[in-house]
Amino acid sequence: MGAVSAREQVVEAARSFSAAGLTIATWGNISLRSGESVFITPSGMDYAALLPEDITEVALADGRVLSGERRPSTETALHLAVYAARPEAGAIVHTHAVESTAFAVTGRTVPVVTDEAAQVLRGEVRTAEYALPGTAELAANCVSALGESSMACLLRAHGAVCLGESLQRALLCARVLEQTCEIYRLALSLGGPAEAFPQERIEKMTVFLQKSYGQKQY
């Protein structure tokens, strides 16, 4: 994947991210892994106005700026820590959406209660212990909350982190997380869901999505 293509993908994702209401103002961040590089949104810039040249390329190994004139996101260390811990992740979206942030404020775990959550989130969504934004401690807490299989976690009093094999999958993860949080909140108001999905069912739904759902690719 060329640098221009990667930058264009991040800009397109950032505009979609903002339009979908997954953040407000300039908060949140998006990154795409490409080989030994990570292309990440700049710190404190309006998503709707981003251009490909605003996206910064940093080294996957140590966060050194490889190309670009903008200061990278203040959460670059968090993205790099997640990539190191979860090699299957090709993209990361850090949201400040309302429903998921509400659960992040309470510190609660969001269970898998729908087929969509089982297929996309792949496990319960835990809340990371609080740490100041942009710190190594927050990065470590995020990795711990994600664990080995969940594709999302909440950051205490902060927002959510969603993973995907691609930017499209990471954005889908963010949307499914927001929907799941809303459904779970409504279910709680009705007395609570009947049950959370057991791990065996989550694994079966993940296989279903990968092998049986959608059109065969030729």
Image: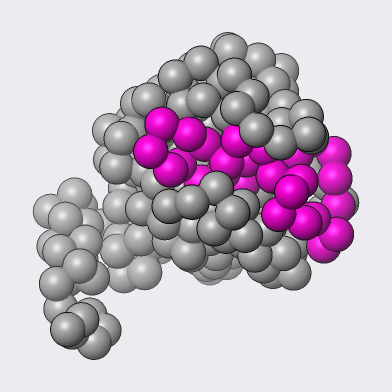
Residue 143 in which image quadrant = top left
- Quarter of the figure with residue 36: top left
> As drawn, is 100 to the left or to the right of 109?
right
Question: Percent x, y for residue 26?
Answer: 83, 46
Q: Which is nearer the eye, 64 or 99? A: 64
Residue 39: in magenta span: yes
Query: Taking the image as drawn, is residue 144 in sight?
Result: yes
Measured from the top left, where is residue 106 in percent x and y?
A: 64, 37
**Seen from this angle, which residue lies furthest bottom?**
215
Viewer-side residue, 72 vs 210: 72
Q: Is residue 24 above or below residue 58?
A: below
Residue 107 among those drawn in magenta: no
Front-lying residue, 142 or 11 = 11
Above-or-below relation of 90 to 58: below
What is the image's colouring? Answer: one colour
Percent from the top left, x then y, of residue 47?
79, 56
Q: Which residues are magenta?
A: 28-57
Residue 167 appears left or right of 89: right
Identify the residue at image location x=65%, y=15%: 135
Q: How many marks?
A: 0
Is residue 113 among the parts visible in the rendering?
Answer: no
At 30% from the left and 52% from the top, the residue drawn is 122
- Please give the name of the residue rendered at 85% of the width and 39% of the height, measured from the top-left corner: 44
